[in-house]
Image (cartoon, grey):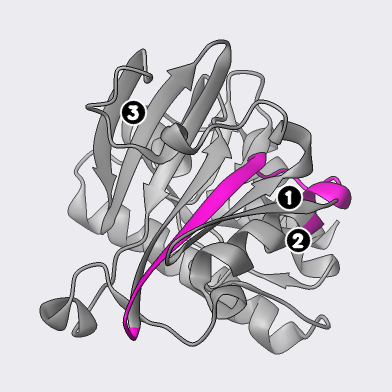
Amino acid sequence: MQLHEIREHNTKIWVSDGVAADFQVEWFVRPQSPLNSSVNQWQSGRQSIIRFKVGVRNMVMRHYCRGGLPARLSKDQFVFSGYQSSRPFKELTLLQRMRQLELPVPEPIAARCMRKGMLYRADIIMGEITESKTLAQIIAQHELEQEAWIKIGRAIWQFHQQGFEHVDLNANNILLDQAGEVYLIDFDRCVHKPYSPSWAQRGIKRLRRSLDKQKSNIEGTHFQSSDFDNLMRGYRS
């Protein structure tokens, strides 16, 4: 799958082959743009996310933000070491590779790296998984059936089997749509490498911690150890 490159001064934009004919640079313009006929902006963790629609295409734009101690110095600027070393380029190409392998991820649309001296800011646009909720949102509202937990485990195993390590596997980065299909999202800093039980188990443990944390912090969360047992049944099947 080919990437089309657009250069504007110190900004580079990469566009996936499937949307190149329809793409407009204005898609990256903030919600004040009259082009964006339907806009919804919200925060997800430290990320700034905009859901918008152009014509019949539903999309999501995520602005790259920093977390932890580095965010005290700069909320959304990163050290520039080359356009193809930038976080948006890496994530877009990773999503393309996953889609080629038919893994359940959002459609990669475009990414932007805006350089200023030795720093850069960045955004990525993906197709929206319509009528979906995060695993965190779902278990805050009601119990999940056993088969749903098994499907989540199977989906995670698909990624691991293909050598994709999700470095921030948590309940907010797992989506389920109305048909019960499972998707993983937010592959910033994730990598493609040979499978190893050590990094695979690291991701599984991170997910378990996020579920336990939600149960502790949000009263009424519907999560039990038996749910995770079912997830692991799916992972190992």
Query: Mark 2–mark 1 contact, CB under 8 Å?
Result: yes
**Is residue 72 rendered magenta in the image?**
no
Q: Foreground: 236 or 11?
A: 11
Q: Is residue 47 above or below residue 162?
A: above
The residue type indicated by label 2 comes to Phe
Residue sitting at x 76%, y 61%? 159
- Which numbered disc, 3 or 2, marks the residue that appears first in the sequence? 3
The residue type indicated by label 1 comes to Ala
Say which element carries label 2: helix
Closer mark to the observer between disc 3 and disc 1 = 1
Tell me the crowding category of disc 3: few under 14, some 14 to 19, or many 20 or more residues within 10 angstroms, Cα based: few
Q: Foreground: 31 or 211?
A: 31
Residue matched to label 2: 159
Q: Is residue 126 left or right of residue 150?
A: left
Closer mark to the observer between disc 2 and disc 1 = 2
Query: Mark 3–mark 1 contact, CB under 8 Å?
Result: no
Residue sitting at x 83%, y 83%? 194
Residue matched to label 1: 155
Tell me the crowding category of disc 2: few under 14, some 14 to 19, or many 20 or more residues within 10 angstroms, Cα based: many
Q: Foreground: 28 or 71?
A: 28
The Cα–Cα distance between marks 2 and 1, rounded to whole angstroms, is 7 Å
Res. 141 mark = 3
